[in-house]
Image: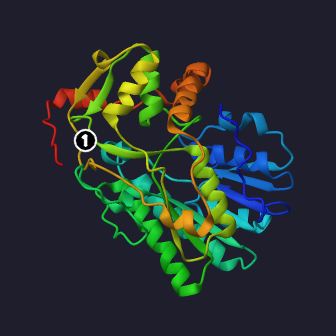
Amino acid sequence: MIELSGFHNAMATFNNKTILVCGGAGFIGSNFIHYILENYQKVKLVNLDKLTYSGNLDNLKDISKDRRYGFIKGDIADEKIITKVFKKHKPDYVINLAAETHVDRSIHVGALEFIKTNIQGVFNILEAVKQNKKIIKYLQVSTDEVFGTLSLDSKEKFNEKTAFDPNVPYAATKAGGDLLCNAYHTTWKVPVVVTHCSNNYGPYQYPEKLIPFFTVRMLEGKKLPLYGDGKNVRDWIYVIDHCRALELVLLNGVSGEVYNIGADNELSNLEIAMMIAKQFGKGKESFEFVPDRPGHDRRYAIDSAKIEMELGWKTVYSFERAFQETVKWYKNNTVWIKKIQKKTGVFNPHIDLWKKHNLKPAIKN
């Protein structure tokens, strides 16, 4: 695993402060907790997590007995839980990473849980922050998917002024939560900041997402299923670079503002698949093209100029090194993978179901 320390902001500090991390047992949340504990010796972290299928306390077992850290099982969509946690722990900072995030599940399983967590949950946190004047800042972590799609032949990138245009239920619910944040700051001056980040990769990611999913498939000797023509493009950022950005925004970001976070590292799903296959000494023979999913955005690209200029953030991890370390992490942590499989079953079962329908892919530039 790549070293987590050494790049924190030396000026502002979380020392002698309490941070409430909502969704801290998930992928980005657990990496954020590791990062903060690595860099702040006098911080207090409270992790509130519902422990859904993708929440995993094994991600945090190495720090579970750290006196600076505490865990509470609870749902941000439960107003009583939120009120109780805020009253008991009196956080100085709040960061919300609790979310239903998998696009495919919002399409094939249903959007109700996305609405509860991504909209109702955000509302509950905003109400609690509004009533607790001690809170310095609330950071709502969101996604570039709220902006919709870009064409492959365009050089356009999403910036903070790009209008929301979500194409799938997941993105629509995240946009709803973001708009609530804007409304609460405008109406009541609630100290909230929103970030939109591109696709993350790194350790502890639930293996329904592309890089760990394909790595697990290779470990199992299975084909890599690519939607449509495989040319859909995403901007890939290493999770610790994202955590560093979240740290800066939580400490120094201006309330009411929005910050986009990206690595300017656009790669297609086909390119990612080839890089993973090569890690196993394989090539295109490992690919299997399946019908495209509904509402599949063609390209995302983030303009990070604002956070770079105003907060001094920039990426420090090269994609080549971090990608190789990430694949190696999953190769070396098969016990972690098998425990998740035992708990949740097959990853992305809907992909195999698609084949039975013989649907034609809808390819659009």
| Residue projecting furthest to the bottom | 187
- Which element type, helix, strand or loop, lies under badge 1? loop
Q: Is any part of residue 87 visible from this angle? A: yes
Other residues around mark 1 within 10 Å, as few (<14) / some (14–19) / many (≥20)? some
Colour scheme shown: rainbow
Q: In terms of depth relative to the viewer, which is nearer, 69 or 33?
A: 33
Q: Position of residue 107 (x, y in %)?
A: 31, 47
Residue that appears at 78% across and 64% down: 11
For residue 99, above or below residue 339? below
Q: Position of residue 28 (x, y in %)?
A: 58, 46
Q: In terms of depth relative to the viewer, which is nearer, 276 or 313?
A: 313
Residue that appears at 48% across and 80% down: 183
Q: Left of 262 or right of it: where is 20?
A: right
Q: Position of residue 345 (x, y in %)?
A: 46, 27
Q: Left of 270 or right of it: where is 262?
A: right
Q: Left of 327 or right of it: where is 82?
A: right
Residue that appears at 43% across and 54% down: 114
For residue 273, above or below residue 196? above
Q: Position of residue 17 (x, y in %)?
A: 81, 63
Question: What is the three-letter code of the residue carrying label 1?
Answer: Arg
Number of marks drawn: 1
- Say which residue label 1 marks: 293
Residue that appears at 28% across and 50% down: 297
